[in-house]
Image (cartoon, rainbow, N blue to C red):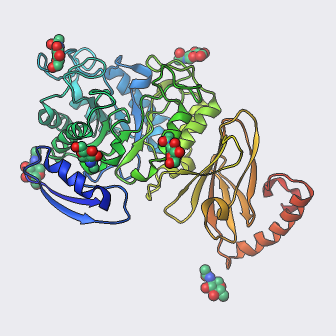
Amino acid sequence: MFLTLPLLLSFGVLSTLAQNLTSSSMTTLSLTLTVETDVPTSTGLSNGLALTPPMGFSSWNQFGDQITEQLFHETIDTMASNGLRDAGFIYINLDDGWQHYKGNRSQNPLEPDPVKFPSGMKALADYAHSKGFKLGIYSGPGDSTCAGYTGSLGHEQEDANMFASWGIDHLKYDSCCSEGIDAPTPEVQAIVLKMSKALLSTNRSIVYHACHCGWANIWEWAASEGANQWRIGQDISDDFNYPGNREKYYFDVLDMLDRGNNITQYSGPGHWNDYDMLIVGLDGNSSQLVGTGASNLEYRTHFSMWCMVASPLLIGSDVRTLSTYDLQTLTNSEVIEVSQDPLGEAAQVVGTQDPGGDLQVYAKAMADGSYAVALLNRGPVTADMSISARRDLTMPWDRYRLRDLWKHKEHGCYDIPYTIEVMPHEAKMLRLWQVDKNATAYTVWNLKLEALRVFEMRKVKPLNAANLPFLN
Ligand SMILES: *[C@@H]1O[C@H](CO)[C@@H](O)[C@H](O)[C@H]1NC(C)=O
Ligand SMILES: *[C@@H]1O[C@H](CO)[C@@H](O)[C@H](O)[C@H]1NC(C)=O
Ligand SMILES: *[C@@H]1O[C@H](CO)[C@@H](O)[C@H](O)[C@H]1NC(C)=O
Ligand SMILES: *[C@@H]1O[C@H](CO)[C@@H](O)[C@H](O)[C@H]1NC(C)=O
Ligand SMILES: *[C@@H]1O[C@H](CO)[C@@H](O)[C@H](O)[C@H]1NC(C)=O
Ligand SMILES: *[C@@H]1O[C@H](CO)[C@@H](O)[C@H](O)[C@H]1NC(C)=O
């Protein structure tokens, strides 16, 4: 097999990565190297997929390995009718437990469990496709998988071919933290690369999730090996903010956000930092995850922030029993637009507004020149938070228009910081556009702004034009 790899690399990693590639049994590859000085990530092998973060469902968090064809049919039917598919959740991903055999691959073939999936995987993929979905599957690079089922070790190409023949569209390839946290990076790289090449050579469009517990600085190199997403940490727990790490292993929502904040530059169209599957709607009932659940508002904040940081969005709860509130959380089109923006930026913390660091401002640039902003209150008390285009976005905008994304509501135009009350564990999702000085709306709003300014001087309250009767 001969491949030509167009590699886009920063100067720093160019020589070492080239060395690592040539030393890892890739003797048949010819490399085309292009050097870009200001691009921190590299793209080498590429399937051209997942230009926005993948959205869908994954079975693990709620069901573990207790999965069946019937569950997937019902999940597909539900998501086709309750708005989730139309909101963009199209990947239906089987996690571990679809396989027939437990134990080592050397002793057992890899095939679907005939009791759980009597019609086989091709039939399930056909069903998913017929309803406008895509089907994802799971395997791992070891002799066996995390839950002890047969893995793909030594059978990578054979398995990739089999998945392609079934019509599979997404593969979660889970190392199950194997080789340990100190595994030499080149070993992990070789494992990820092997399946990447196997998938590419099938010629089927299969999104590739290389899962390695957020170890080996995987974000630094997995994109160049053709991975579309990689976990940035160990498993999430069903908690918004559990003190410390549960069992010294699990990350809650805030831990995961903190872990991702320094590595946003590695995320972008086709290659995403994965903050783990969504916990919205688990309510502490997960058969797999530790954690006592979170409030409706906390789950909504979790979803907001996963959209801000451009994480893949895989629903982990039972979609058949989602509450109306959680369904509204998952289907808010303006919040999802932030996730699916074609620029593919991942939001970073651009400011904190209290000494303890509980009041954080996250921001990301959007393709249309606007900014998405989350005002996140991690603390225990309601607080005033503010956003300023100049201070927080470093945009020299004289005027900006501001919209509340959860409420689908315009909040008017401002030239001064906009202040709003944020509840404990709430994230206000806002979007700011520069206002064209020449627009008629600008003149109208300019007049209103003068009134607002007077109002603000009298009472220091959030500027909210809709609350001002004399303006309507
Ligand atoms: C290449 O491998 C060496 C160890 O052999 C490691 O120190 C280095 O970080 C790797 N380089 C890249 C770019 O992954
Ligand atoms: C499975 O394979 C591993 C590694 O090759 C080996 O250590 C283990 O003994 C095998 N297990 C069984 C049940 O054969
Ligand atoms: C994939 O496409 C290449 C180039 O068109 C072709 O040579 C190869 O046979 C195809 N492989 C499969 C498995 O269809
Ligand atoms: C992120 O980077 C800052 C500055 O380099 C550092 O102080 C902080 O510990 C880092 N955080 C994480 C989670 O790595
Ligand atoms: C989930 O747990 C809550 C209490 O934590 C309970 O009221 C609810 O019935 C459970 N739901 C399911 C589907 O088990
Ligand atoms: C606004 O109007 C001024 C004066 O008419 C003009 O010079 C400027 O180019 C206009 N700006 C935009 C963005 O249209």
In this orientation, which residue lies closer to the viewer: 268 or 262?
A: 262
Residue 325 screen position, x and y as percent: 61, 32
Residue at 80% x, 52% y: name it: 462
Q: How many marks?
A: 0
Image-based side of 440 in relation to 43, left or right: right
Q: Is residue 158 visible?
A: yes
Q: Residue 263: x percent and y percent?
A: 44, 47
Ligand 5 resides in the quarter of the picture at top right
Near-viewer residue (157 or 439): 157
Residue 373 spot, x, y in % from top left: 61, 53
Q: Residue 39 is drawn in which quadrant?
A: bottom left
Picture quarter containing residue 135? Answer: top left
Q: Identify which residue is drawn at 20% across, 15% down.
A: 101
Question: In what quadrant of the picture does the C terminus appear?
Answer: bottom right
Q: Look at the picture and state if 124 lies above or below 194.
A: above
On screen, residue 127 above or below 290: below
**286 displayed left or right of 270:** right
Whether residue 253 sits left or right of residue 275 in the image: it is right
Q: Is residue 93 above or below residue 398?
A: above
Residue under the image location 41 percent in, 47 percent down: 53
Task: Find residue 97 and report its image quarter.
Answer: top left
